Image (spheres, grey):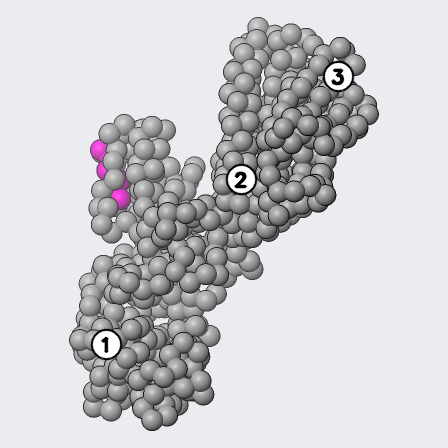
Amino acid sequence: MKRTLRTSILSTLLLLIFLVLSNSALAQSALDCQRCHQAEYAGSLRSPHSFTQADVASELSTDDVGKSPSQVVQDEDCVACHGPVAVALNGGMTESQVMGTFFTTSGGLFTSSTVAKDSLNWPNVNCVTCHNVPSDHFVSMPTLSMFNSQTAKYDSAQSSSVLCGQCHGSLHFPDTDHRIYDAWKMSKHGHGGQFDVAGELAANDTGRTPNEIVQDEDCIGCHAPTSVVINTSTGPSLITEGQALSNFFTTTGGKITSSTVPQDTIDYPNVACIACHDPHNPGKLSYFNSSTGQYQVMSSPDSLCAQCHGNLRFPGTDHISYNFLLGEGGTGVQSQVSMAGQPTCIDCHMHKSDADGLNSTMYEGHSWQVFVKEPDGSITASCTTCHTAMSAASSMAIVASWKSQFAQLDSTAEADVALADTFMTTHPNDTLKTAYLAEASQNMIVAEDDESGGVHNHGYSVALLNDAIAKSQFIVTGVKPRPSGVPLNFALLQNYPNPFNPSTTIRFDLKVTSKVTLDIFNVLGQKILERDYGNMSAGNYQRDLNLDQFASGVYFYTLRAVGTNGQTFQATKKMLLMK
């Protein structure tokens, strides 16, 4: 029973060995780990770590033609990450000798015909690449270590993420173009999470035990799921989520206080690499479930993100970005799917360009930023992948305008809902208004729980907040709320995309039924185009505009709306045509 439990625990993280070749010069232990760790071994055979030789051969035949093995190693040390333990073969070799042994050359130089050879003995990235296995294993446990092919010795790794960062980051090679670890460290996944949790515990959970907190809101499950695995003298061991919370946050008398702060910030894993990647098969997206201590293979990147940024693991969560993109959660407001269901989470938040030397390429999307600062100080944006006529600057302007509109509406909604709530304390028997208050509160909370500031599904955000405002105002004033989705004010929004070539979209809001015209002017103030849209009902609109017949330059568009109630609205904005 104890052995079965230990095997189950050990199978969760990369603290285990999945293959030790008994005839390897590096295997301090003569045990064949495959016999005990069959699942890890099977996963490793499907992992990208087990297919590194072909990748190296392909790069040599395309990027290193005419170079010798020693020149290649000096420029970019392939062996160090793609097959470091190869230096221990044949009685010991240099990295250059390894390159000449396992890849074909002509006259001592790589050619466009270079291919892999002796694949049977090529070690790939095997177990002893990442684990230093003592000769008295199982009495002593393996340690997490990176085999350094330059020194033929092990470098101890503080954590699994630091181990990954040796090759998938700049920890081993500062000038590498593989900077996933560096990007992760800059993101909220890689830093700051422990202090966020501590702040919430101190503010909202005073007087409660860690176990009570985990039952209500499982912080560990998303902020540091792999913290439930700890190292002991007999190997990794699985603890409860409540125990993990106690390990990393201070308590008094076993309870959270207003003075609770992080403790042991060195070992706190944040959202580690191995929270989303099974270390023995990292090419397969997997979510580490801290309640079971097991990996769950995900059907798509979106389903992985939605474990914590949606309600796929925690149905009652208030982090609902994934659901909000689908237009879910509101009451009495028509659902709106963001951009017809596209793009996905990673299309926007794992922005990768295809240009060498750009951060957006080297980070492989692991900064999770829509806007990425490149080495030259410029900004690139994921938006431009789909909206090719847009620039990063115009993308940022649109996002800023959406956030500004959301912030203004949200501030109004919070004030109006609070006022309505106060009003209802003296009118508790009004059934209709009680129902309206519940709907207004829910719609406001749903819009806020998206946590994007109105960007993920802007139209739905605006509709929810307008509904909350209208129903709250009805509760206090008795004035019948306008239909769901009808704007509270007239508005002319920035065209999208901008700059554009040659088409763009003009978006505007009508508070009441109005006669609408749109005029286009050049920089001299001359009207060059006019659109008469006639009478339009109150609502949110967009109209496409094509300026193919005009030259590149700055233009102005003016919307004029004359409402049936006599109210007039006029606004002008600038746009840029770039051919």
User: The residue under label 2 is which amino acid type?
Assistant: Ser
> Which badge, 1 or 2, comes first in the chain's sequence?
1
- Label at residue 394: 2
Q: Nearer the viewer, residue 112 or 348?
A: 112
**Dot 3: within a 10 Å radius of its alpha carbon, few (fewer than 14), some, or many (20 or more) residues?**
some
**Dot 1: within a 10 Å radius of its alpha carbon, few (fewer than 14), some, or many (20 or more) residues?**
many
User: The residue under label 1 is which amino acid type?
Assistant: Ser
Locate residue 85, reporting x and y percent. 27, 80
> Which badge, 3 or 1, comes first in the chain's sequence?
1
Locate residue 331, reporting x and y percent. 65, 29
Is most of the magenta stretch helix, strand or loop? loop
Q: Where 439 sits versus 74, above or below?
A: above
Q: Where 400 sits versus 562, above or below?
A: below
Q: Nearer the viewer, residue 302 or 538?
A: 538
Most extreme residue toward the front is 524
Q: Judging from the image, what secondary structure is the residue with disc 3 in? A: strand
In the picture, which quadrant includes the N terminus? bottom left
- Label at residue 149: 1
Locate residue 350, reporting x and y percent. 48, 53
Magenta part of the chain = 248-252
Task: Tell me the mark number nearer the camera, choosing from 1 and 2.
Answer: 2
In percent of the image, x 69 and y 10: which residue is there? 479
In percent of the image, x 71 and y 14: which residue is there? 568
- Residue 474: name its quadrant: top right
The answer for how far apart the CA atoms under marks 1 and 2 are is 47 Å
Q: Is residue 457 visible?
A: no
